[in-house]
Amino acid sequence: MEKKSSSNLSMILVIALGVIVVVLGIAAFYFYNQYQNIKKNPNQVAQAETEALVAQVGKLIDLPKDETPTVATVLDKEKLKDQPFFSNAQNGDKILIYTKAKKAIVYRPSANKLINVGPIAIDQKSQVQVAVVNAGGDVDGATKKLNDKFSGSIAIVGTSDAKNKNNVKQITVVDVNGQNADAAKQIAEQLGGTVGAMPAGETAPAGATVVVFVK
């Protein structure tokens, strides 16, 4: 009788282990596919992150329903200290800019609270706000070309380093909010680059409507 019970227990253990192996295999396959999809579609990831951020901020304040905000992350608060609206911003804060609604929001994910909310003056005929990001290229040369060629129509709002330069394969110009297609195209042509999507892992510097990744 004991031998039969022991045999039954062994069989149960074998079946249980088999089930666990199958489940782990399915999970590994699922997460591998998800990883491959992320590599192929970084824009979808960025879109999902924006949607999640908007959903979270929307729990704290009513947001415009007819537009998707431009989202930026504060990477260096010292560069914003002279701007009153961002005086209380900290590194890691998210900035949501609603162009049509002319509204800006500073949100702190770590504390899940709003730091500042206010109107922004946006003149559609004003200069295009351009951020230049170093991805291993001649940033000074690119900046000079832009200032010489587009003086009066664009404003360089700052320069920074790419988070992962290997993700940028060539000079890439990103129209952050989709409202500066002509300017992005002209900038790309001037620098010998291409208009494209935000490279994986990168975010638009605060205040920039066009981002130039210099490779």
Image: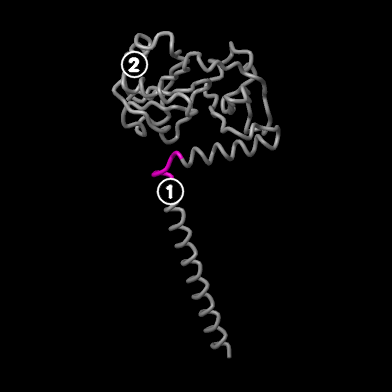
Label 1: which secondary element: helix
Q: Residue furthest left?
A: 192
Q: Amino acid at mark 1?
A: Tyr
**Left of 209 or right of it: where is 194?**
left
> Residue 215, how many percent across, how many down?
32, 25
Judge by depth and name the residue closer to the eye, 76 or 42: 42
Q: Amino acid at mark 2?
A: Ala
Q: Nearer the viewer, mark 1 or mark 2?
A: 2
Image quarter (top left, top right, bottom left or bottom right) of the N terminus = bottom right
Relative to 147, say whether 163 is above or below: below
Residue 42 falls inside the magenta stretch? yes
The residue under label 1 is 35
Local crowd size for mark 2, using a 10 Å CA cut-off: few (<14), some (14–19), many (≥20): many
Q: Quadrant of residue 78?
A: top right
Helix, strand or loop at label 2? It is helix
Image spot of residue 142 (x, y percent): 34, 16
Instruction: Tell me the residue at 59%/25% (across/down).
Output: 100
**How many angstroms separate mark 1 from mark 2 (CA)?**
34 Å
| Residue position for label 2 | 142
Q: Which residues are magenta?
A: 38-43
Q: Is residue 138 magenta?
A: no
In the image, 118: left or right of 92? right
Q: Residue at x 47, y 42 (%)?
A: 44
Q: Is residue 68 above or below residue 17?
A: above
In the image shown, does 4 or 160 lie closer to the viewer? 160
Q: Is residue 150 above or below residue 91?
A: above
Mark found first going from the N terminus, 1 or 2: 1
Residue 138, image quadrant: top left
Residue at the image point whose x is 43% and y is 23% from the top: 211
Number of numbered discs visible in the structure rendering: 2
Near-viewer residue (25 or 143): 143
- Sort mark 1 into few (<14), some (14-19) or many (20+) by Cα contacts within 10 Å: few
